[in-house]
Amino acid sequence: MSIRELEKDENTQARYAFLKAFDKIKNHLSPDDPETYWNIASINGQPFKSPRTSAPQTKKVWRGDSQHENVLFLSWYRAYLLRLENALVNNTPVGDQDKGALHYWDETSDESLKDGLPSLLTVDFVEIDDFGNTIPNPLLGYILPNAIPLNEANQKYTKAAGYTTCRYPFSGLMNPRNPSKYTTNSQLQNNYLNLLLRYPEDYLNQNIVHSLNNLHHPLIPIKEMYERCLDIDNYNQFSNIVSATGGQISLEQASINMLHTLGGNSPPSKEFQIELVAGSHGDLGAKEMAAFDPLFFLHMANVDRIFWLWQTKYQVNTVLQPFTITPDDGTKPKNGQGPSPTQQGDQELDMNTPLNPFTSGADNQPTVTNDIIDIVNQLNYGYTNGSITLEQTA
Protein backbone atom coordinates (compact mmCIF):
# COMPACT_ATOMS: atom_id res chain seq x y z
CA MET A 1 0.00 0.00 0.00
CA SER A 2 1.04 3.61 -0.23
CA ILE A 3 2.89 5.20 2.68
CA ARG A 4 0.00 7.57 3.31
CA GLU A 5 -2.38 4.61 3.48
CA LEU A 6 0.05 3.02 5.92
CA GLU A 7 -0.20 6.12 8.12
CA LYS A 8 -3.96 5.66 8.63
CA ASP A 9 -5.28 4.32 11.93
CA GLU A 10 -6.78 1.20 10.33
CA ASN A 11 -3.28 0.20 9.16
CA THR A 12 -1.48 0.79 12.44
CA GLN A 13 -0.39 -2.82 12.92
CA ALA A 14 0.90 -3.08 9.35
CA ARG A 15 2.86 0.14 9.91
CA TYR A 16 4.41 -1.21 13.11
CA ALA A 17 5.40 -4.43 11.32
CA PHE A 18 6.95 -2.54 8.40
CA LEU A 19 8.96 -0.22 10.64
CA LYS A 20 10.19 -3.07 12.86
CA ALA A 21 11.28 -5.13 9.85
CA PHE A 22 13.10 -2.19 8.27
CA ASP A 23 14.78 -1.38 11.56
CA LYS A 24 15.90 -4.99 11.95
CA ILE A 25 17.54 -5.33 8.53
CA LYS A 26 19.24 -1.94 8.98
CA ASN A 27 20.42 -2.17 12.54
CA HIS A 28 20.14 -5.64 14.06
CA LEU A 29 21.51 -8.23 11.63
CA SER A 30 25.07 -9.49 11.36
CA PRO A 31 27.02 -7.46 8.76
CA ASP A 32 27.62 -10.59 6.70
CA ASP A 33 23.93 -11.54 6.64
CA PRO A 34 22.72 -11.33 3.00
CA GLU A 35 19.48 -9.74 4.22
CA THR A 36 21.11 -6.82 6.00
CA TYR A 37 20.32 -3.44 4.47
CA TRP A 38 23.99 -2.76 3.78
CA ASN A 39 24.27 -5.81 1.55
CA ILE A 40 20.99 -5.16 -0.26
CA ALA A 41 21.71 -1.46 -0.86
CA SER A 42 25.21 -2.34 -2.09
CA ILE A 43 23.72 -4.30 -5.01
CA ASN A 44 22.58 -1.11 -6.75
CA GLY A 45 25.88 0.72 -7.14
CA GLN A 46 28.75 1.24 -4.72
CA PRO A 47 30.75 -0.46 -3.37
CA PHE A 48 31.73 -1.82 -6.77
CA LYS A 49 32.80 -5.43 -6.20
CA SER A 50 31.48 -7.41 -9.18
CA PRO A 51 34.40 -8.53 -11.37
CA ARG A 52 34.16 -7.90 -15.11
CA THR A 53 33.79 -11.23 -16.87
CA SER A 54 34.35 -10.16 -20.49
CA ALA A 55 35.78 -7.33 -22.57
CA PRO A 56 33.38 -4.32 -22.42
CA GLN A 57 33.87 -3.42 -26.14
CA THR A 58 33.47 0.26 -25.29
CA LYS A 59 35.26 2.91 -23.24
CA LYS A 60 32.09 3.83 -21.37
CA VAL A 61 31.35 1.20 -18.71
CA TRP A 62 29.27 0.88 -15.55
CA ARG A 63 30.89 -0.91 -12.63
CA GLY A 64 27.60 -1.76 -10.90
CA ASP A 65 25.03 -4.45 -11.68
CA SER A 66 22.00 -2.12 -11.84
CA GLN A 67 20.57 -1.34 -15.26
CA HIS A 68 20.04 2.20 -16.52
CA GLU A 69 19.50 3.76 -19.93
CA ASN A 70 18.55 0.45 -21.51
CA VAL A 71 15.56 -1.88 -21.88
CA LEU A 72 16.35 -3.79 -18.67
CA PHE A 73 15.84 -0.78 -16.40
CA LEU A 74 12.31 -1.68 -15.29
CA SER A 75 12.72 -5.44 -15.05
CA TRP A 76 16.03 -5.20 -13.16
CA TYR A 77 14.49 -2.90 -10.57
CA ARG A 78 11.43 -5.13 -10.24
CA ALA A 79 13.78 -7.98 -9.32
CA TYR A 80 15.66 -5.68 -6.94
CA LEU A 81 12.50 -4.55 -5.15
CA LEU A 82 11.48 -8.18 -4.72
CA ARG A 83 14.87 -8.86 -3.13
CA LEU A 84 14.24 -6.18 -0.50
CA GLU A 85 10.63 -7.20 0.07
CA ASN A 86 11.64 -10.80 0.71
CA ALA A 87 14.15 -9.59 3.30
CA LEU A 88 11.48 -7.45 4.98
CA VAL A 89 9.00 -10.33 5.07
CA ASN A 90 11.62 -12.69 6.47
CA ASN A 91 12.41 -10.21 9.24
CA THR A 92 8.87 -9.17 10.12
CA PRO A 93 8.11 -10.04 13.78
CA VAL A 94 6.70 -13.49 14.50
CA GLY A 95 2.93 -13.39 14.23
CA ASP A 96 2.92 -10.48 11.79
CA GLN A 97 4.39 -12.17 8.72
CA ASP A 98 1.10 -11.69 6.88
CA LYS A 99 1.69 -7.95 7.22
CA GLY A 100 5.23 -8.04 5.84
CA ALA A 101 5.59 -6.04 2.63
CA LEU A 102 7.45 -3.28 0.85
CA HIS A 103 5.27 -0.20 0.42
CA TYR A 104 5.40 2.73 -2.01
CA TRP A 105 5.31 6.50 -1.95
CA ASP A 106 2.48 7.61 -4.23
CA GLU A 107 4.24 10.63 -5.72
CA THR A 108 1.25 11.98 -7.65
CA SER A 109 -1.42 11.69 -4.95
CA ASP A 110 -3.28 14.88 -4.09
CA GLU A 111 -1.38 15.03 -0.80
CA SER A 112 2.02 14.66 -2.49
CA LEU A 113 1.15 17.31 -5.06
CA LYS A 114 0.22 19.68 -2.24
CA ASP A 115 2.61 18.77 0.58
CA GLY A 116 5.44 16.58 -0.75
CA LEU A 117 6.58 13.65 1.38
CA PRO A 118 4.39 11.84 3.91
CA SER A 119 5.38 12.62 7.49
CA LEU A 120 6.45 8.99 7.98
CA LEU A 121 9.38 9.75 5.66
CA THR A 122 10.57 12.86 7.48
CA VAL A 123 9.99 12.49 11.25
CA ASP A 124 12.94 11.62 13.48
CA PHE A 125 11.20 9.00 15.63
CA VAL A 126 8.34 6.56 15.00
CA GLU A 127 6.07 4.54 17.26
CA ILE A 128 6.33 0.77 16.93
CA ASP A 129 3.63 -0.48 19.30
CA ASP A 130 0.41 0.49 21.05
CA PHE A 131 2.33 1.40 24.22
CA GLY A 132 3.99 4.42 22.62
CA ASN A 133 7.49 2.96 22.39
CA THR A 134 9.56 4.69 19.72
CA ILE A 135 12.72 4.08 17.69
CA PRO A 136 14.77 6.33 15.38
CA ASN A 137 12.92 6.39 12.07
CA PRO A 138 14.42 3.58 9.93
CA LEU A 139 13.07 5.24 6.77
CA LEU A 140 14.86 8.53 7.31
CA GLY A 141 18.38 7.69 6.15
CA TYR A 142 21.28 5.34 6.81
CA ILE A 143 24.60 5.35 8.63
CA LEU A 144 27.10 3.32 6.60
CA PRO A 145 28.53 0.52 8.76
CA ASN A 146 31.48 0.09 6.40
CA ALA A 147 33.67 2.39 4.36
CA ILE A 148 33.39 2.68 0.58
CA PRO A 149 37.05 3.12 -0.40
CA LEU A 150 38.34 4.68 -3.57
CA ASN A 151 39.01 1.36 -5.30
CA GLU A 152 35.31 0.44 -4.87
CA ALA A 153 33.86 3.85 -5.68
CA ASN A 154 33.49 6.66 -8.10
CA GLN A 155 36.08 9.13 -6.77
CA LYS A 156 33.32 11.65 -6.14
CA TYR A 157 31.49 9.29 -3.79
CA THR A 158 34.14 7.76 -1.54
CA LYS A 159 32.75 7.38 1.99
CA ALA A 160 34.10 6.59 5.44
CA ALA A 161 32.37 4.16 7.79
CA GLY A 162 29.85 6.15 9.81
CA TYR A 163 28.84 8.41 6.93
CA THR A 164 25.15 9.40 7.18
CA THR A 165 23.15 9.75 3.98
CA CYS A 166 21.55 13.09 3.24
CA ARG A 167 18.79 14.49 1.06
CA TYR A 168 18.23 17.80 -0.71
CA PRO A 169 19.15 20.55 0.14
CA PHE A 170 22.25 19.15 1.91
CA SER A 171 25.44 17.94 0.26
CA GLY A 172 27.14 14.66 1.10
CA LEU A 173 30.28 14.99 -1.00
CA MET A 174 33.36 13.95 0.95
CA ASN A 175 37.03 14.66 0.33
CA PRO A 176 38.33 11.62 -1.62
CA ARG A 177 41.72 12.01 0.07
CA ASN A 178 40.08 12.02 3.50
CA PRO A 179 36.54 10.62 3.24
CA SER A 180 35.78 11.48 6.86
CA LYS A 181 35.86 15.17 5.89
CA TYR A 182 33.37 17.04 3.72
CA THR A 183 34.58 18.88 0.66
CA THR A 184 34.87 22.63 1.18
CA ASN A 185 31.75 23.33 -0.89
CA SER A 186 29.73 20.70 0.97
CA GLN A 187 30.80 22.08 4.32
CA LEU A 188 29.79 25.60 3.30
CA GLN A 189 26.45 24.33 1.99
CA ASN A 190 25.60 22.41 5.14
CA ASN A 191 26.78 25.14 7.51
CA TYR A 192 24.62 27.65 5.66
CA LEU A 193 21.54 25.41 5.90
CA ASN A 194 22.08 24.80 9.60
CA LEU A 195 21.95 28.55 10.20
CA LEU A 196 18.53 28.91 8.58
CA LEU A 197 15.39 28.99 10.68
CA ARG A 198 13.33 26.59 8.55
CA TYR A 199 13.43 22.83 8.91
CA PRO A 200 15.41 21.17 6.08
CA GLU A 201 12.44 18.98 5.15
CA ASP A 202 10.49 22.16 4.39
CA TYR A 203 12.95 22.92 1.58
CA LEU A 204 12.76 19.33 0.35
CA ASN A 205 8.97 19.32 0.29
CA GLN A 206 8.93 22.69 -1.43
CA ASN A 207 11.27 21.31 -4.10
CA ILE A 208 9.06 18.23 -4.57
CA VAL A 209 5.86 20.24 -4.94
CA HIS A 210 7.58 22.59 -7.38
CA SER A 211 8.96 19.74 -9.51
CA LEU A 212 5.67 17.86 -9.60
CA ASN A 213 3.49 20.82 -10.49
CA ASN A 214 5.11 24.09 -11.39
CA LEU A 215 7.80 23.66 -14.03
CA HIS A 216 7.41 25.61 -17.26
CA HIS A 217 8.52 25.01 -20.85
CA PRO A 218 10.97 23.60 -21.80
CA LEU A 219 10.86 21.78 -18.45
CA ILE A 220 8.06 19.29 -17.85
CA PRO A 221 6.41 18.77 -14.44
CA ILE A 222 7.08 15.27 -13.13
CA LYS A 223 3.36 14.58 -12.70
CA GLU A 224 2.93 15.21 -16.43
CA MET A 225 5.92 12.97 -17.18
CA TYR A 226 4.29 10.06 -15.37
CA GLU A 227 1.06 10.64 -17.27
CA ARG A 228 2.68 11.04 -20.68
CA CYS A 229 4.83 7.93 -20.47
CA LEU A 230 1.68 5.84 -20.04
CA ASP A 231 0.49 6.92 -23.50
CA ILE A 232 3.41 5.07 -25.14
CA ASP A 233 2.34 1.61 -26.27
CA ASN A 234 5.85 0.35 -27.15
CA TYR A 235 7.72 -1.22 -24.22
CA ASN A 236 11.20 -0.09 -25.26
CA GLN A 237 10.19 3.54 -25.64
CA PHE A 238 8.09 3.49 -22.47
CA SER A 239 10.87 1.94 -20.41
CA ASN A 240 14.09 3.89 -20.94
CA ILE A 241 15.61 7.18 -22.05
CA VAL A 242 17.72 5.77 -24.89
CA SER A 243 14.83 4.07 -26.68
CA ALA A 244 12.46 7.04 -26.22
CA THR A 245 12.65 9.32 -29.27
CA GLY A 246 10.85 12.24 -30.87
CA GLY A 247 9.84 13.99 -27.68
CA GLN A 248 8.65 10.83 -25.92
CA ILE A 249 8.97 10.77 -22.13
CA SER A 250 10.02 7.39 -20.74
CA LEU A 251 9.22 6.17 -17.25
CA GLU A 252 12.96 6.15 -16.59
CA GLN A 253 13.12 9.88 -17.33
CA ALA A 254 10.36 10.59 -14.83
CA SER A 255 12.20 8.48 -12.25
CA ILE A 256 15.51 10.26 -12.86
CA ASN A 257 13.91 13.67 -12.48
CA MET A 258 12.26 12.71 -9.20
CA LEU A 259 15.51 11.33 -7.78
CA HIS A 260 17.30 14.57 -8.63
CA THR A 261 14.46 16.45 -6.96
CA LEU A 262 14.98 14.37 -3.81
CA GLY A 263 18.76 14.52 -3.86
CA GLY A 264 19.71 17.57 -5.87
CA ASN A 265 22.71 17.26 -8.16
CA SER A 266 20.66 17.99 -11.28
CA PRO A 267 22.92 18.04 -14.35
CA PRO A 268 23.00 21.20 -16.49
CA SER A 269 20.35 20.27 -19.04
CA LYS A 270 17.12 21.59 -20.48
CA GLU A 271 15.46 18.42 -19.12
CA PHE A 272 16.10 19.17 -15.45
CA GLN A 273 14.99 21.96 -13.19
CA ILE A 274 17.44 24.14 -11.32
CA GLU A 275 16.85 23.37 -7.64
CA LEU A 276 15.24 26.06 -5.52
CA VAL A 277 18.27 25.84 -3.20
CA ALA A 278 21.49 25.59 -5.20
CA GLY A 279 24.49 23.51 -4.18
CA SER A 280 22.69 20.41 -2.94
CA HIS A 281 24.29 17.03 -3.59
CA GLY A 282 22.32 14.46 -1.64
CA ASP A 283 22.72 10.73 -2.11
CA LEU A 284 19.43 10.17 -3.91
CA GLY A 285 20.70 12.24 -6.82
CA ALA A 286 23.58 9.83 -7.55
CA LYS A 287 22.97 6.26 -8.77
CA GLU A 288 26.21 5.20 -7.07
CA MET A 289 24.73 6.00 -3.63
CA ALA A 290 20.94 6.33 -4.01
CA ALA A 291 19.97 2.92 -2.62
CA PHE A 292 21.50 3.68 0.78
CA ASP A 293 18.53 5.96 1.49
CA PRO A 294 15.35 3.89 2.12
CA LEU A 295 13.34 6.55 0.30
CA PHE A 296 14.94 5.26 -2.91
CA PHE A 297 13.10 1.94 -2.61
CA LEU A 298 9.77 3.61 -1.82
CA HIS A 299 10.23 5.74 -4.94
CA MET A 300 11.22 2.76 -7.10
CA ALA A 301 8.22 0.80 -5.80
CA ASN A 302 6.04 3.59 -7.17
CA VAL A 303 7.90 3.35 -10.49
CA ASP A 304 7.19 -0.39 -10.51
CA ARG A 305 3.52 0.35 -9.74
CA ILE A 306 3.32 2.61 -12.79
CA PHE A 307 5.08 -0.08 -14.84
CA TRP A 308 2.33 -2.51 -13.75
CA LEU A 309 -0.35 0.05 -14.64
CA TRP A 310 1.18 0.30 -18.11
CA GLN A 311 1.24 -3.49 -18.47
CA THR A 312 -2.40 -3.68 -17.42
CA LYS A 313 -3.45 -0.86 -19.75
CA TYR A 314 -1.93 -2.56 -22.79
CA GLN A 315 -2.80 -6.10 -21.59
CA VAL A 316 0.81 -7.33 -21.55
CA ASN A 317 0.85 -8.46 -17.93
CA THR A 318 0.74 -12.26 -18.14
CA VAL A 319 3.16 -15.02 -19.08
CA LEU A 320 0.92 -15.94 -22.01
CA GLN A 321 0.64 -12.32 -23.16
CA PRO A 322 3.83 -10.49 -22.13
CA PHE A 323 5.36 -7.26 -23.33
CA THR A 324 8.26 -7.75 -25.73
CA ILE A 325 11.71 -6.25 -26.19
CA THR A 326 12.66 -5.48 -29.79
CA PRO A 327 16.11 -4.39 -31.04
CA ASP A 328 16.82 -0.65 -30.98
CA ASP A 329 19.44 1.68 -29.50
CA GLY A 330 18.20 0.82 -26.01
CA THR A 331 19.04 -2.87 -26.39
CA LYS A 332 22.81 -2.28 -26.63
CA PRO A 333 24.50 -1.30 -23.34
CA LYS A 334 27.11 0.86 -25.10
CA ASN A 335 24.42 3.35 -26.11
CA GLY A 336 23.45 4.12 -22.52
CA GLN A 337 25.22 3.72 -19.19
CA GLY A 338 27.71 1.30 -20.68
CA PRO A 339 27.91 -2.44 -20.02
CA SER A 340 27.71 -3.70 -16.46
CA PRO A 341 30.35 -6.24 -15.34
CA THR A 342 28.68 -9.26 -16.97
CA GLN A 343 27.76 -7.47 -20.22
CA GLN A 344 29.48 -6.34 -23.40
CA GLY A 345 28.81 -3.06 -25.15
CA ASP A 346 27.49 -4.61 -28.37
CA GLN A 347 25.49 -7.31 -26.60
CA GLU A 348 21.81 -7.46 -27.59
CA LEU A 349 19.72 -7.24 -24.43
CA ASP A 350 16.46 -9.20 -24.54
CA MET A 351 13.80 -10.94 -22.45
CA ASN A 352 16.27 -13.68 -21.46
CA THR A 353 19.28 -11.54 -20.53
CA PRO A 354 20.29 -12.33 -16.91
CA LEU A 355 19.31 -9.67 -14.39
CA ASN A 356 22.42 -10.13 -12.27
CA PRO A 357 22.86 -10.85 -9.43
CA PHE A 358 19.30 -12.12 -8.92
CA THR A 359 18.27 -15.76 -9.17
CA SER A 360 14.91 -17.53 -9.37
CA GLY A 361 13.42 -20.95 -8.81
CA ALA A 362 14.49 -23.94 -6.78
CA ASP A 363 17.64 -24.34 -8.88
CA ASN A 364 18.63 -20.66 -8.47
CA GLN A 365 18.93 -19.93 -12.16
CA PRO A 366 19.68 -16.31 -13.16
CA THR A 367 16.51 -14.22 -13.11
CA VAL A 368 15.48 -12.91 -16.54
CA THR A 369 12.73 -10.52 -17.60
CA ASN A 370 10.47 -13.41 -18.60
CA ASP A 371 10.51 -14.55 -14.95
CA ILE A 372 8.95 -11.33 -13.66
CA ILE A 373 6.24 -10.38 -16.16
CA ASP A 374 3.27 -11.07 -13.88
CA ILE A 375 3.64 -9.60 -10.39
CA VAL A 376 0.48 -11.33 -9.15
CA ASN A 377 0.91 -14.89 -10.39
CA GLN A 378 4.69 -15.12 -10.75
CA LEU A 379 5.83 -12.91 -7.87
CA ASN A 380 2.86 -12.98 -5.48
CA TYR A 381 2.45 -9.26 -4.82
CA GLY A 382 0.24 -6.42 -6.00
CA TYR A 383 -0.55 -2.73 -5.53
CA THR A 384 -3.43 -0.84 -4.00
CA ASN A 385 -5.24 1.67 -6.19
CA GLY A 386 -3.15 4.80 -6.26
CA SER A 387 -3.41 8.23 -7.81
CA ILE A 388 -3.23 7.09 -11.43
CA THR A 389 -5.86 4.70 -12.74
CA LEU A 390 -6.21 3.62 -16.36
CA GLU A 391 -8.62 1.81 -18.61
CA GLN A 392 -7.41 -1.20 -20.56
CA THR A 393 -6.94 -0.71 -24.28
CA ALA A 394 -9.17 -2.69 -26.58
Image: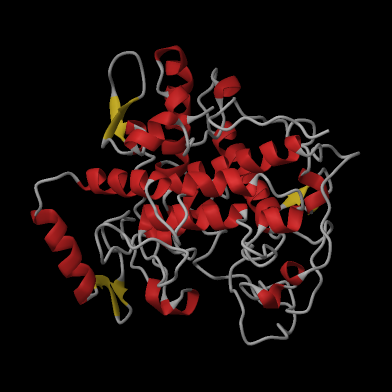
Picture layout, residue 354 above or below residue 313? below
Name the quarter where the N terminus is drawn.
top right
In the image: residue 177, left or right of residue 303? left
* Residue at left offset 41%, top offset 79%: 155
Q: Quadrant of residue 194?
A: bottom left
In the image: residue 123, left or right of residue 345? left
User: Who is closer to the viewer here, 154 or 113?
Assistant: 113
Residue 111 in view (yes/no): yes
Picture layout, residue 373 above or below residue 269? above
* Residue at left offset 41%, top offset 37%: 23
Picture layout, residue 342 above or below residue 17? below
Q: Residue furthest front?
A: 217
Query: Residue 356 location in percent, x, y?
Result: 70, 60
User: Who is closer to the viewer here, 184 or 325?
Assistant: 325
Query: Residue 308 location in percent, x, y?
Result: 69, 38
Picture layout, residue 9 above or below residue 65? above
Query: Residue 357 location in percent, x, y?
Result: 68, 59
Q: Quadrant of residue 126?
A: top left
Q: How many marks?
A: 0
Query: Residue 163 location in percent, x, y?
Result: 31, 60
Q: How is the image coloured?
A: secondary structure
In the image: residue 375, left or right of residue 184? right
Residue 141 in view (yes/no): no
In the image: residue 36, left or right of residue 52? left
Name the quarter where the C terminus is drawn.
top right
